[in-house]
Each structure stands twice: as C-alpha cells, then as structure tokens.
Image (cartoon, rainbow, N blue to C red):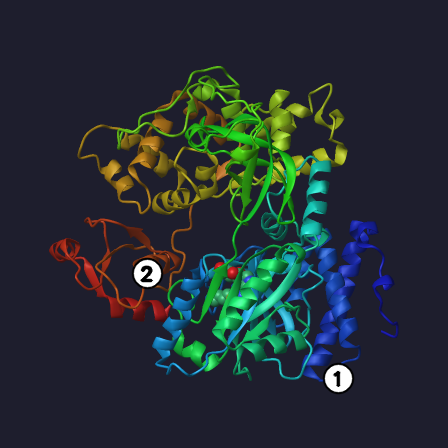
Amino acid sequence: MGVKLTANTFKKVQDLSEVEASEELNWLAHEIERHNILYFNHDQPEISDTDYDLLRQRSSIIEAYFPSLASHNGQNLRVGASCISRFGKVKHSVPMLSLDNAFNEMEMYEFTDRIRRFLHLPDNEPIAFMAEPKIDGLSISLRYEKGMFVRAATRGDSLIGEDVTANVATIQEIPIRLIGDDIPKIIDIRGEIYISHADFSEINKKQKKIGAKLFANPRNAAAGSLRQLDAGVTASRPLKFFAYGLGEAESLSADTQELINSNLARWGLPTNPLVKRCDTANALVRYYDEIVQQRALLGYDVDGVVYKVDRLDWQYRLGCSARAPRWAIAYKLPSEQAITLLQDIEIKVGRTGALTPVAKLKPVTVGGVVISNATLHNEDEIIRKDIRIGDMVRIQRSGDVIPYILGPINRQRHGNSKLFVFPSVCPVCSSKAIREIDTMTGKTEVVRRCSGGLICPAQAKERLKHFVSRNAFNIEGLGSKQIELLFENDWIKNPAEIFTLEQRNSTYIHPLEEQKGYGKLSVEKLFAAIRARRTISLERFVYALGIRYIGETTARSLSQTFNDWNTLRNVIELAADENLDNEAYKDLVNIEGLGPSAITSLISFFKEAHNIKVLEDLLLHINVEQVNDIQNSTSYISGKTIAFTGTMDSLSRSEAKVQAIRLGANVVNSISKKTDCIVAGSSAGSKLTKARELGITILSEKEWIKLINEN
Ligand code: IVH
C-alpha cells in the first residue's frame, strides 16, 4: 500500500458521490480481503493493525451512509462469518439474562446469605464481590472471532436477539480488532451501549430542529439510535459502550470476574473506571453510598449497582435461574426527584379516546435530563394527590418510566393555586367524555374517554401516528410531527391516504415539496420510505390497526395462529356469531395471552362498518405477507399445537412456552382435538386426563428438556 493511512487519507464520507462511494467500497473490499489472507492464511501482515482497522472502519462508515451499497459489500464486516442481513435474528449461544433486584440493604444481605447457604460456606469464609455501576442503556453482545469483530446482537428475548452488526460497527468506542495474544478464538463480549447526558441533549436539540420526535430519556435515545435500519443515522449519533462481561468464550484463562474485567480493558474495550472489588459486606454498602453520591456527576444514567461473585468457579456452581444468574444482583438506586412549578394541566386525547392529563412544568433538570412534561395519569390521581395548578410539585424520573408527579409540596402552597376541573367533554371534538363501567368487574373505569370514536379528529390523528410508529409500519420520515402537519392540512386523513399521497401529490398545484419543512429531496425520501412499506408483515399490520387491547404480543399471537390476513379476519367475523358453540370464538379464546377484553374489542372492531371501509381502502394499496409457519422445520414440534400443564422442576412454564414458540410451535391454554402434544409436569390434573382420552402425545418434563436440548 505504501501510504501511511490516517483519518485524513480519505475524503469526507458526506462529500462522496454514490459512484465514488461504490468505487471506494469495492477497493476497500479487495484490500481488506487481501489483508485478511495475508494475516489469517499466511501470518504475514503487510500493514499495521491500526491501518487495517482504519480500512474496516472506513468501509463500515461508507456502508452506513450509503445503505443501498451495503448489501454486496456487507461481508467486509464479518471475517469468517456468513453474511447476515440487517436485523436478522441471532441466537445467543449463551442467553443474555437479566438481573434480580434488591431494593434495600436487607435484600442485599439476603442475597449474600443465599449465596453462602447455596455454596455451604462457613460463616467466616469471605466472599469477594465485584461491584459496578449498572448502566441504564441497552445490552449488547459483541462476537469476536480470532480477535476480529464479526457480529453484534441485541438482547432480544434473551435467547434470540437482533443482528445490529452494521450499526454497531459505526460506534467509534467499539474496537474492530482486539489487541493481545490471549484472546479466545471465539468470544462474546457483553456490555451496555448508552448515551451521555450531554450528547442526549444535543440529539434532542437536533431532533427538535428537524421536527422529529424528542426522546424521553437517554436510554430511549440510545435504543432509537441503534435500531435504525439506516446505519448512517446510527453513525451520526454519539453512542458509547462499556464492556462488563462475557457470553460464550472458548478457552478463557481467567478465574475471577476481576480478571475478566482487566482482560477486557487490556484487549482494548472500554470498561467502567468505577468497577471495584469489595471484600466485605461493609465495602458493598460503602460502594453503594459512593455511587449514590456521585450519580449526578457521572454524566450518564446509572440505575443501580451490580454485585457479582468474584470467583468464577463459584459463579458456575451457583448457575442461573431462567431469568437471572444467582451469582449477581442489581441493587437499585433511588429514583431521581426534583421540585418544580406546575404551570398548567393539558388534556391529551389518545387513539382510543382516553383523556390523559399532562402536567406542564417549569423545566427542571432531574438527574441530568431536562423535564418539562409529566403524566398525571387520570382524574382520580389528581384528586387523590390534591394537585393544583400553581403548586410546587415533586416529580420523579426513573430510567424506563415516563416522569410523573409524586405530589404537591403543600407547605409551599400560596393560596393562588387553582383546582383543576377535569373536562366532561372531549377538548378536541366536544363529544361527551365518559367513564365506562367495566362489564367484568362492574366498577367505573379510571379512564375518562371521548365517546366521539370515529368522528373525533384527535383519535383519528393518534391512530395515524400509531399506524406509522416504529413497531407498526415504521415509515421513516413520517413521525408524529409530520402526521400532525399532514393531518391538519388534509393531506392524510386515513391510512390509505398515506399510500395515495405520492400519486395525488403529482397532481397538486402546490405539492408537498413547496410546503414548509420539505424540499425535493426529503419528499423523494419520504415517498421511497412509504413505497418500501407497501409490503408488510401480518403481525405489524395487525398491531398497526391500533385495536384496543391488541398490542404487539397479541398481534404476534394472532398472526402466528392464523397465518394470513383473510383467515384472521374470517375467524374474527365468525366469532361475532352469538352461538355459544362457536368454533371461531373458541379458537380465539384458545390463543395464549388473548383475554376476553381483547376478543370483545377485536369483534367490535370488525363489526364497525367504518373500520371495514378503512381496511378495504388500505388493502388496495398494500400487500400483507403471509406468516411462514414452519420456522424450524428440523424440530419435532414446529408447526404443532402444544399445551403445558402441571409444574416443572427445572424450568418455569413461561420459559418452556418461550422455547416452544422459538421452535415454531403454537402454544395454547386449553386442550382440544386440535392439540398435537402436551407437556405434563408434576401434579398435572384434568388437562392430562383429557389429553389421554383424546389420544394426544404426552411428553414428560425430561422428554421436553431433551427435545429442547436437541434443537
Ligand atoms: S451483568 C447475566 N453488569 O442490566 C446478566 N449488567 O437488569 C449479567 N447492565 O441486561 C449482567 N450495567 O444490560 C451487568 N455492570 C453491569 C451492567 C449490567 C448494566 C444491564 C444489562 C442487563 C441488565 C439487567
């Protein structure tokens, strides 16, 4: 190569034309491939590691900016690994578990006592722990083969995550190559991706400027930045990383957690400088106090302290439950609070008509993040807490929940506070807002709802926002802000109109290109994003409809049960027949996680003529994919209907269900002729008897575990 590579050797990625980018990617691919061969096959590298890394980093950054060029060059990232498409699924060879929590000192001591009992240690035997800040970000697993970064996966359901390799490759803090001569051939590094407080406010400033949705907290910003189909966006966000542990590791020479940490650091991975060994119980408490003290100064969100048994042989003996390791615990930090002025209360009308009171606060910093809105939940909460406009209120923010108001500071009430009268009509469409009576419990619901239903523009608009949201149609460039604008100006009033916008726009005298906030390029991009969603998976489609009680999980269950849209719709329409022996209704009842309210809601959705019209209009423009039902054709249970009964000793029933679903089975609650197989734990009752009568295959817990292990 002959040239000394520096970051300046290359033209700025932003300045490359697509042709130049493509040419350079080709050149890089050849160059990287040549150096791979020199390095891996001949042990004769021609360039320094740093230069090699620079080439790969350059390649991934260009790919990130030019995603259309990425597919044929994508394999650059993965030496020795087959190319996996972005957001494909990755099975974790070692599950990415969660942590059990301790909320007070006593629970922390219970944890250390449990360990002592489990290991049969005498009272005077010290147990050393590694203590670390618990970073409030996203967990990630990084696979390195022969020291080279080959794949990154999110935690997902702990067993299967999403492939975010291309996105993670753009994070500067994550090395493409590890340094050292003792790196296991294959190693999964586990850690947390996060965003600092300072970067978080910068991101939100930029979001505001471009009219995009603001992130509620740094963790959401990190998640949103990482899970971008366009890795160029990820590249532009300052994501950071701390490594804290390992997943699969081939021939590791460490016997303590402390050594794992120092190895990670030596290999070039960022580790948290506050990680500390604690040899006594007192030291554990002191560590916690120190972190509480330093919390606001750290510059990033920390939601607890993690204690890990230091000796790895003990970790191994302690093992893990289905959810979390027994050798570690998260001692939660108190949530952060602040006091500020409640300036006003506004009512937000949701897509199901729910009126939610939102507190408008004098902006205040809570744990490094500026808060100006908080939820007040519902009218009963306001009365119960006696919250009045003009009060000084205490607000609380903890990483994963929307900030909320704990209550007023009564001492500081000066007589000018105003009682808030909750409206009895919808503030948007003026329809009556009522509190329904729950038919199951006979109680009045806490939520007041606008009864305007389909005529309420607020509901229609919120439904549209939901329709385009990330887990539904996920249309890039069509977020809440844009829907707000397009709806108000009558460009898009219903889902079908999203897909006719491009065609209509070409006939307008003043097309979208001329509207504020839009230009030729952004409009083209928007239409391309819309076109890209003309084909949609069944589960996303069902979820996007925004039917009350049908969330992502139930949408997934429905689509996995019925496989295609027409069947699903037929079953729901048939279930509306009030005949008690209604087979279709029973099919719905039998779906795991689908309760009576959800079923009633589905049925009434399809009874409503307006909904049918909206659906039919929409279906003229899109194609709903069928579910590929056999997900794992090698497994005995894939495509089969299975039920669990009795208690199992070695795993929870929920875990068994997750395993079954992962192997492509359809899990049901009750047994019928349609059930193929049941797994019976101990003291299985009537279900087992019924299964015998019906001649259904019965598996014991042991047989089940064997089957799972074989797959
Ligand atoms: S150790 C087997 N250490 O907390 C799980 N986790 O609530 C071992 N986290 O999903 C996890 N900082 O993403 C560990 N220093 C730390 C951590 C940490 C943050 C996250 C991690 C995990 C979650 C569990």
Measured from the top left, where is residue 258 in percent x and y?
A: 57, 77
Q: Residues within 10 Å of mark 2 (few under 14, many from 20)?
A: many
Q: Is residue 388 above or below residue 473?
A: above
- Tell me the CA gap for discs 2 and 1: 50 Å
Q: Residue at x 67, y 61 (%)?
A: 169
Q: Amino acid at mark 1?
A: Gln
Q: Earlier in the sequence, mark 2 or mark 1?
A: 1
Q: Going by the image, does 136 lie left or right of 508?
A: left
Residue on which disc 1 sits: 44
**Left or right side of 314 for 265:** right
Quadrant where the C terminus sits is bottom left
Q: Residue at x 69, y 25 (%)?
A: 506
Total count of labels: 2
Q: Residue 49: percent from the left, percent from the top? A: 75, 76
Camera-nearest residue between 387 and 543: 387
Seen in the picture, residue 120 relative to 231 is either above or below; the reply is: below
Q: Quadrant of residue 586?
A: top left
Q: Residues within 10 Å of mark 1 (few under 14, many from 20)?
A: few
Nearer to the camera, 409 or 424: 409
What residue did someone put label 2 on?
Answer: 656
Judging from the image, what secondary structure is the residue with disc 2 in? helix
What residue is at 65 percent from the left and 73 percent from the top?
A: 148
- The N terminus lies in quadrant: bottom right
Instruction: Say if residue 468 shows up in the picture.
Output: no
Can you see residue 508?
yes
Dot 1: element: loop
Amino acid of disc 2: Ala
Q: Nearer the viewer, mark 2 or mark 1?
A: 2
Q: Quadrant of residue 499?
A: top right
Ligand 1: does it lie within 8 Å of the C-beta at label 1? Answer: no
